[in-house]
Every structure is written in structure tokens, then in C-alpha cells.
Amino acid sequence: MRTKSLKTNKINVVTLGCSKNVYDSEVLMGQLKANGKEVVHEEEGNIVVINTCGFIANAKEESINTILDFVQKKEAGEVDKVFVTGCLSERYKPDLQKEIPNVDEYFGTSQLPSLLKALEADYKHELIGERLTTTPKNYAYLKIAEGCDRPCSFCAIPIMRGKHKSTPIEALVTEAEKLAAKGVKELILIAQDLTYYGLDIYKKRNLAELLEALVKVEGIEWIRLHYAFPTGFPMDVLDLMNKEPKICNYLDIPLQHIADAILKSMRRGTTQAKTTKLLQDFRATVPDMTIRTTLIVGYPGETEEDFETLKDWVTAMRFERLGCFTYSHEENTHAYNLEDNVPEEVKQDRANQIMEIQSQISWELNQEKIGQTFKCIIDRKEGNYFVGRTEFDSPDVDNEVLIDATKFYLKQGEFTSIKITEAADFDLYGEPVEK
């Protein structure tokens, strides 16, 4: 007698792009699991959901290639269904439907209930704050707001993510408590713009009040701030950073450029003098703060003189952490009306020059750490090393502390005191010390 086999659907969620997308994928996975679905992250599955990025040219290309790869697998019978969500899909849905019709369905950034329905699951309101985290167990991203109200000329985020919308403090505290209960020790606060937090719902910049509530969550030992906008930064946050050991002396504040003509064209609402003064105030208030920034080179109209101004400023400011992107000419942004007149090879050369300067600064700053002892969180073991971070380093983008695993045993996900013995441009080497 033949028995009918029941095919189990396994949903594979593939995440591209930034930490905001990681967070969104985790929310989706939490909802699917609560619906009794079998769900994995970037493993084998017969149903695929691709969470895309549409921010700049390279990210769009990666997203399109990933979609095409899975569509090919579908045509070869290796997967049954392919769904696409996220920023690329929000921004280019009609084009994608036309160019890649073999995707089962496309969804935008705010269509989670519809996506769940397509996956034969219900959106459960009572699951607010529940996620299936994909990061190492010791840290998690906490998205405190969605969207952006800033008018930056080069940026397509408002097109893809809409207007700024803060999440209420109580909801974020609940989410933080749930994460802490799962063993999360570090919260990385993310948004398109942390500076603006609270203005829409509390009628004032309320980041400090949110932090005061989050530091009370038991089990959370580090709180890290990512993606603050320079204009209107709430300085009371710095006083709290000084006073409250749980708040890392770390701030990610993308500044983009420093030449006044470029800042004006970028619609950043600031000047070189104001930006420099802001950074000096940061340093004066929190002397051992690590500042991470990102810059854009090759913006339309950027002259050699503008670039020299930027280079001199980077040399003078000595940022602890810095990343540099080449300008990407994005449709429907204000800058798209300008001529993209800096050749690609010039853009790349300028980015390389900035990173060379930064590499030297980073090396010099790292040499000063030799002999010092830092509290480190151990994220993972890789080859012959345990890989950890200090409070001055964010995962994936900053320095790492490497500890020889053939000599020492450390617990992943735990804090330990590490004495730095050697330092390279972007990595530190150390040994555990008894407290």
C-alpha cells in the first residue's frame, strides 16, 4: 500500500544590505516561526525570500544577481518559489516585474502582512518585539525608527523607507527585555537617523530618554549608537554617555563631506566650521569617545580643491573609524538632476587616497593601545583565533581583537579582559588577563 508523502516547505530568508534589513528579516522569521513554519537564514530551503537592498549601484547589482541566481534555481527545479521584498523591490517593482517575471511575487518595505499571506502565514500583532535573531547570540540590532525626513540630495532612502517614524519607548524596552532574556548582552541602536528620534511622537528629540529606559534592562551590558545625523544632535546624550557605563563611548555619525560647496549641494544643512565645532564639542564632553564616520567622494561637481579640503580635514580630525564610498548617481534623488561629472576611476582613486590616510591614522591610534587592557566581548572563533571587540568597535565594520585559541580558551558570547600585545592597521592582538 502506497503512503502519500507530505512535502514540508522550508523557507530560506536571504538578507542583503544593511543592519536595518537584518532586523526586518529577523522580524519576518519570528512571524513565520510563530505560524509553525520551518524557517532558516541563508541555508537550503525550497521557498526563498530575498530581502533586497536598493541603496547604491553596487547594492542594487548584488540584489539583482541574487534574484537571478534563485530564479535560475527555480527554473532548474532546485527551489519551488521565489519571493522578493525590501528596498530594491519597493523602489523598482514595476521594472522588476517586467524584467524578471519568474519571481512569484514582489513586496515593498512595508508589506510584511501581505508577504506573510503569500507564505501562508498570518501577521500576529501580539508578536511585536519577537524576532528570530540571525546575529551571534551576544548582540542584536534594535531598530528605534523607520524612514527619514532629511532632504539629502544623494539619498534614496526616503523613497524606499518613507517618512521618519519613531517606535515608542515602551515597545523598545519590551523588545530589549525579550532580547536580554535570550542572552543578548549588547544592543546596537539603528535607524536611518537616531538624531531625529522622538520628534514625531514626543514632539522633542528623545534619544536620551530612550537610553535612560534601556540602561535599566537587566542583562544588557553595552548599548551602541549607530547612524546619527550631525544637524540637531541631542547633546544631552553625551552627558548620559559619560555618566552611564552601559552606553558605549562610541558614535556612528555619517558626515559625507566637508567642503562647504559640496555640503550645500548635498543639502546637509551644515558647514565645515559647524561640523568641526560639533566634533570638538563631542571630544571635549566625552574625551575617550570613538567616532565612526562615512564619506562620499566623487559627488557631482567635486573639484580637486574640494577633495584636497576633504583630505586635509580627515588628516586633521583623526577619526578612530572611517569608511569611504564613491558617489552613486541615483534616480529620483535631487542630485540626479546634476551631471555625474567625476569619472569613475577618479572617484575610486579618491576613495583609495582617503582610506590610505585613514589606514595610517588607525595604525597610529592602535599602537597606543599596546599594553592597555580592555573589556572585550568574544563574538566567535575563527580558525586559530577567538575574535572579540572592545566597546569602541561595532561588529562587521570596525577593528577586531584576535586572541590565540591554541594558547587560550575563551567562551563565545562572554565578556573578558584582554591585554593588547600587538596592533596592526585594523586589528589588535591580545591575551586574557585575570581580573
Image (cartoon, rainbow, N blue to C red):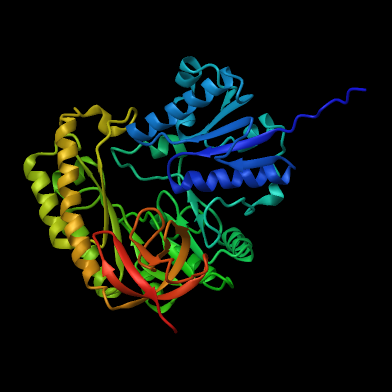
Res. 334 image quadrant: top left
**Residue sitting at the far left:** 305
Residue positioned 27% across, 31% down in the render: 329
Please count the marks in the image: 0
Looking at the rendered image, the quarter that the C terminus falls into is bottom left
Taking the image as shown, residue 402 lies to the left or right of residue 23, namely left
**Residue sitting at the far right:** 1
> Where 166 sits versus 320, above or below?
above
Residue situated in front as seen by the camera: 200 or 213 = 213
Res. 298 image quadrant: top left
Q: Position of residue 341 (x, y in %)?
A: 15, 29
Residue situated in front as seen by the camera: 209 or 411 = 411
**Res 411 visible:** yes
> Where 411 sits versus 149, above or below?
below
Residue positioned 55% across, 73% down in the render: 216
Res. 9 image quadrant: top right
Residue positioned 35% across, 66% down in the render: 392
> Where 31 sits versus 278, above or below?
above
**Res 91 visible:** no
Q: Position of residue 313 (x, y in %)?
A: 14, 56
Residue positioned 67% across, 35% down in the render: 10
Looking at the rendered image, the quarter that the N terminus falls into is top right
Q: Position of residue 184 (x, y in %)?
A: 56, 63
> Where 55 sits versus 103, above or below?
below
Residue situated in front as seen by the camera: 359 or 223 = 359
Taking the image as shown, residue 206 lies to the left or right of residue 173, namely left
Q: Position of residue 50 (x, y in %)?
A: 53, 33
Residue situated in front as seen by the camera: 26 or 338 = 26
